[in-house]
Amino acid sequence: MSDATVLQQEIAVEQEHVDRVYTRLAELRKDASRAEKEGYQLAGVGTFGALVERDAMVYHRARRRHALDAEYEGLVFGRLDLGTGAVHYVGRMGIRDENSQSLVVDWRAPAAAAFYRATPADPLGVVRRRMIQSTRERVTNIEDDLLDPEAAPADMRVVGDGALLASLSKATGRGMRDIVATIQREQDDAIRSPASGVTIVTGGPGTGKTAVALHRAAYLLYADRSRFAGGGILVVGPSGVFVNYIATVLPSLGEDTATLRSLGSLVAGYDAARTDPTDVAALKGSLRMRRVLERASHDAVPGGPTELRLLYHGALLRLDAGDLDRIRRKALPRGARRNEVRGTGFDRIFDALWAQAKGSVRNLPEKREFEAELADRGDFRDFLRAWWPRFTPMRVLRWLAEPARLRAYANGLLSREEIALLQGSFDGLAADGPTISDVALLDELDELMGRPRQPQRKKGNPFHVRDGVQEVSTFADRQAAARAQVVRDEDYRDYAHVVVDEAQDVSPMQWRMIGRRGAYASWTIVGDPAQTAWSGDPEELDRSRDRALGSRRRNSYSLTTNYRNSSEIFAVAARVIRTIMPDLPLPSAVRSTGVEPVDLVVGTAQLPDAVRESAEKHLSDVDGTIGVITPVPRRDEMARWVAGLPERIQVVTALEAKGMEYDAVVLVEPAEIATDASGTRTLYVALSRATQRLTTVGTRDWTRTGG
């Protein structure tokens, strides 16, 4: 019997079970809808107990129906044949038949753990592990791993070359796909790490760090939903490009409650994508900037009043610049928050004017009446608003665009060379908004200055119709409305779990920003020190991260296998990183395509055509996405070179490429990326994004310069 015939027969066997699962799923959907409708009919009994029973039934049945109505591509993806003769199917959600027998085990359940953890050396009672590939409800392929040949029955069939390698050859779409069907044991260890404390996952390119972090979030929501769905899970990525790339993973696993943010969008009201040069970003990310910002937050308002003159009952009351400065300093000692002590500043102005009035005004009224008279004067109110306005972080950060102010705030904290480097980096705030590094500074200013007190708003009743009239509602309706009213706002800071991806690039100031949102959270930290773009003080970076994570217990995991790159592609990336880190342990690439990367050196005039032709060639080489990776300053220029080509081609900078994956990559001007050690690490990242094809195109032979 041919291999093709055996494959089709085994597919038919699995299709029969998958059909049974989807039939049962349809029955469960129908039952849930019917039970929800029947719940409302209980009200006809007329007793209070019946109403409570009705509301509870409707609420829980509605939740169940919502879960069953969700779309699950490839609902059943795995099968375990055990040495006991038992068979377990593994999928995205647990389903039982009408007799409560398991048809599908949820991938996060303990019973499914062997699907990911069993190996030939330690099969955990598993004889054969089968991956089932489907398109909606139709089984399209199967791949088997025979883990315990000695225990296999004589009639057991084994199909394919192994599930993992088969999965690795699949084309990459525009978004990241989940790896729930092909999680490996070292990845599963990290995913199922204890929920409390800090889980730290390190690994080189292609080891599945990001996928592990996202699947861990899904696992935590399954294992302790009340804790993690109630408090919320925050996933922080390096860029908006990256966040868009991973956005579909958790929904594909049946979880849609996590919050995804980039470092540039973590502060409410901002979605920064601009980047600073590496040396400027290192300065803005340094903890020394906190003291610079503190000085700025305590300074006098640029263009504010330098004198107060009031004619009161025939007497001139006057406060000069020195008086106003002393009053501001006393009202705003170090550690005080400017927006929160605004009233204290106003009180001191009243006190100073009262002291003058007592010596120069006849028939002076009581102090309370004196203050009321001043408060009624429009010119006095205008002075107070101009002298001590309500400050926003952006308003204060823009002050650093003035060279004299920047020098004053940074004096003694930054060197002359560093101050000169920062000058001009804040000029684009007004027109272009903040850079990614600026967002952490805005968050720090928000912390330093506090927020003006806002009057509490009464919460509206969603069922109120008009005075004295309220809409009839069920307990379930009221529960749903209550949940809607506690939807997390953009500045929510009480997350139960925080995931930080590409953590090696998070600056000290950014660690402070993230830490404020996870003060009571458990954490998952994912990264690779060899890929860091941080060029500042490494010890300062470590201290900042440790301060954010606190004294929580830490569990560390190392991923050692590169599942993304072919061995031919990763060999090129490895040679680059070895030039600056010769002893670095690198992951092992597990597959070979036999296709060597292509390196093109062309003249400057020929570069645009060479880039476009390389991208067009890869359109026929691969079925998935193609990344055109550029030096940071030249992205827009090089994007025009491939304009009009299919959407499968995506243009990103070398920094935006972090965490991304493409079937093919055209890397442009690698020599312009690797200008120093930090740039060499960034080039290492760019070279390790491709799964199947890699072409480098430049005007210089970058391979002879060590990157």
Image (cartoon, rainbow, N blue to C red):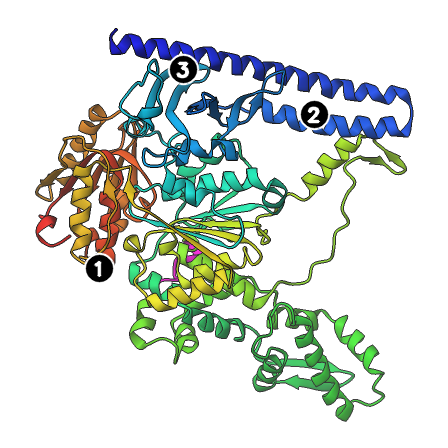
Q: Position of residue 466 (x, y in %)?
A: 85, 36
Element class at badge 1: helix
Foreground pick, 494 / 316? 494
Q: Position of residue 213 (x, y in %)?
A: 43, 44
Q: Label 2: which residue?
A: 61
Q: Position of residue 616 (x, y in %)?
A: 20, 28
278 is higher (above) or lower (below) than 204: below
In this view, the mark in front (1 or 2): 2
User: Which of pointers 2 and 3 lies earlier in the amino acid sequence?
Assistant: 2
Foreground pick, 377 / 233? 233
396 is higher (above) or lower (below) than 460: below
Looking at the rendering, the stretch of residues picked out in magenta corresponds to 425-431
What's the CA distance linking mark 1 and mark 2?
58 Å
Which amino acid type is shown beneath numbered disc 1? Ala
Q: Would you say the residues marked 1 and 2 are in contact, meaning their CB atoms lie under 8 Å apart?
A: no
Q: Assess disc 2: are there few (<14), some (14-19) or many (≥20) residues with their C-alpha within 10 Å of its C-alpha.
A: many
Residue 677 is marked as: 1
